[in-house]
Amino acid sequence: MARWEKPYKDMPAFRLADLDGKVWNLKRLEGKAVVVCIWASWSAPCHMLLPQFQKLYDDLQGREDVEVVSFNVDEDVSPVRPFMTKHKYTFPVVPSFVFVGQLVGFLSVPRLWIIDAKGKWQWEQVGFDASAEGWEDEVRRRLESVHSPAPGS
């Protein structure tokens, strides 16, 4: 069962490198709304969510006012790249076992975070319900509800 919650704390500043070496920095993401999928390669619910997340990533990839990224929480990241290749996933993957563990205290996945253009953590979805229809529409609705376009966009 999945549930949406308002986070009870602020998103701390982070500076984390993805599997390709690109650095993701919360401060540099200001001006964009951010969707973050927290997942693990060993999690069956994540396996159900990730095809939907890939579709969301593909649909939002062209928008200059939105970033979509995933934080992987595998303690050993060695299986992550082969997992991505096997499933033909193309979204960015940031190894973040320590960061996510320190932030949420206990690790249950999958999770989805929505951060507004000012860097404020606005929404968290805990879990994923594969039988629920309209997941992408709900994510988009929540994303747009916190989105404030950067000046000039």
Image (spheres, rainbow, N blue to C red):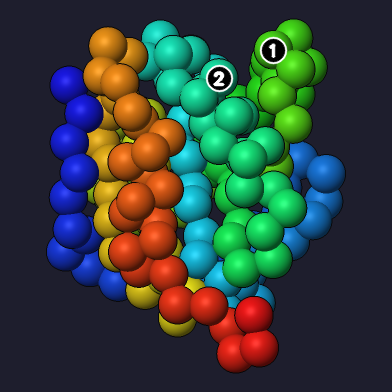
Placement of 37 over or under 61, stated as above or below: above
Mark 2–mark 1 contact, CB under 8 Å? yes
Quarter of the figure with residue 115: bottom left
The quadrant of the rendering that contains the N terminus is top left
Q: In the image, what residue type sits under mark 2?
A: Pro
Query: Is residue 38 toward the left or the right of residue 31 in the image?
Result: left
Badge 2 crowding class, 10 Å Cα cut-off, few under 14, some 14 to 19, many 20 or more, is: some
Closest to the camera, between mark 2 and mark 1, is 2
Q: Nearer the viewer, residue 79 or 115?
A: 115
Q: Residue furthest bottom?
A: 151
Q: Is residue 136 visible?
A: yes
Please give the residue where the numbered disc 1 appears in the rendered image. Answer: 87
Badge 1 crowding class, 10 Å Cα cut-off, few under 14, some 14 to 19, many 20 or more, is: few
Q: Is residue 97 visible?
A: no
Query: Is residue 36 toward the left or the right of residue 82 in the image?
Result: left
- Location of residue 151 in the rendering, given as x and y in whole percent from the top left corner: 60, 90
Query: Is residue 118 toward the left or the right of residue 60 in the image?
Result: left
The residue sitting at 32% across, 41% down in the picture is 138
The residue sitting at 27% across, 28% down in the picture is 127
Mark 1 lies on a secondary structure that is helix
Please give the residue where the numbered disc 2 appears in the rendered image. Answer: 51
The residue sitting at 45% across, 77% down in the picture is 148
- Location of residue 87 in the rendering, given as x and y in whole percent from the top left corner: 69, 12
Quarter of the figure with residue 49: top left
Q: Nearer the viewer, residue 48 or 73?
A: 48
